[in-house]
Image (tube, grey):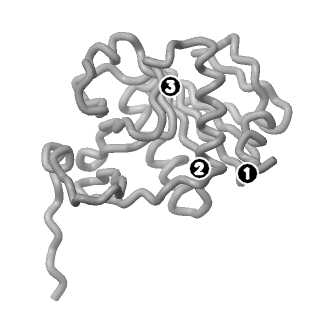
Amino acid sequence: MARAIKKLTLDEYLAYDDATDVRYELVDGDLVEMPPESDKNNLISLYLLSQFLKFVPIQLIRHKDTELVVIGNRTRVRLPDLMILTQELLEAMAGGRATITPDMPSPILVVEVVSPGKVNEDRDYRYKRSEYAARGISEYWIVDAQKARITLLTLVDGLYEETVFQGTDIIKSATFPLLDVTVAQVLTAGQMQ
């Protein structure tokens, strides 16, 4: 008979240390190991970070290792590829652990770069979409190099409205209306030269 594995609470997750450098997300009480990102995905998120630096100070940008607590059937903790914080959120974090808890304001923008595979697609297109909407995140970008598109989700009355950009389309962001970058520029940032 299989032994039941104890579900972790948020506090137990935040205190968890297995003495490795493995990154985990917490999904409904279970630790889910997050494999290392591909170099392509890292380059894409770094390129976007460089573009956002034109509009916000580096203190308001988080890349890879800041945790975001969302609510599912149980508490979930996600590790977005890129986030843009508000000044209020930065102050709420106040130099402590890089974790955005439910009592803190939400980031204004989250970017996920989709890794290959159905599990990764489902996580970014389905689960995180509803989690980030429930968290009140104004804009959620899904960057999908495999499908050569960027899906921009804008929060309207609690639900995301979707716009898909491809090829030479300039990404039109309500949060960053002066952003002047095309899907092709973003996706080619992840290609080896």
Q: Is residue 132 above or below residue 144?
A: above
- Residue 22 image label: none
Which residue, given by chain and number where applicable, does mark 2 sit on? 114
Residue 185, position as x, y percentages in the image: 78, 34
Which residue, given by chain and number where applicable, does mark 1 sit on? 147
Q: Residue at x 18, y 52 (%)?
A: 16
Q: Is residue 22 above or below residue 185?
A: below
Residues at discs 1 and 2 in contact (Cβ within 8 Å):
yes
Question: Which corner quadrant of the image does residue 150 belong to?
Answer: top right
Q: Is residue 186 above or below residue 50?
A: below
In front of the other: 137 or 168: 168
Measure the C-alpha gap from mark 1 to mark 2: 10 Å
Q: Residue at x 65, y 23 (%)?
A: 51
Query: Is disc 1 surrounded by few (<14), some (14 to 19) or many (20+) residues within 10 Å?
Result: few
Upstream in sequence: badge 3 or badge 2: 3
Which residue, given by chain and number where applicable, does mark 3 sit on? 109
Amino acid at circle 2: Val
Q: Residue at x 78, y 29 (%)?
A: 182
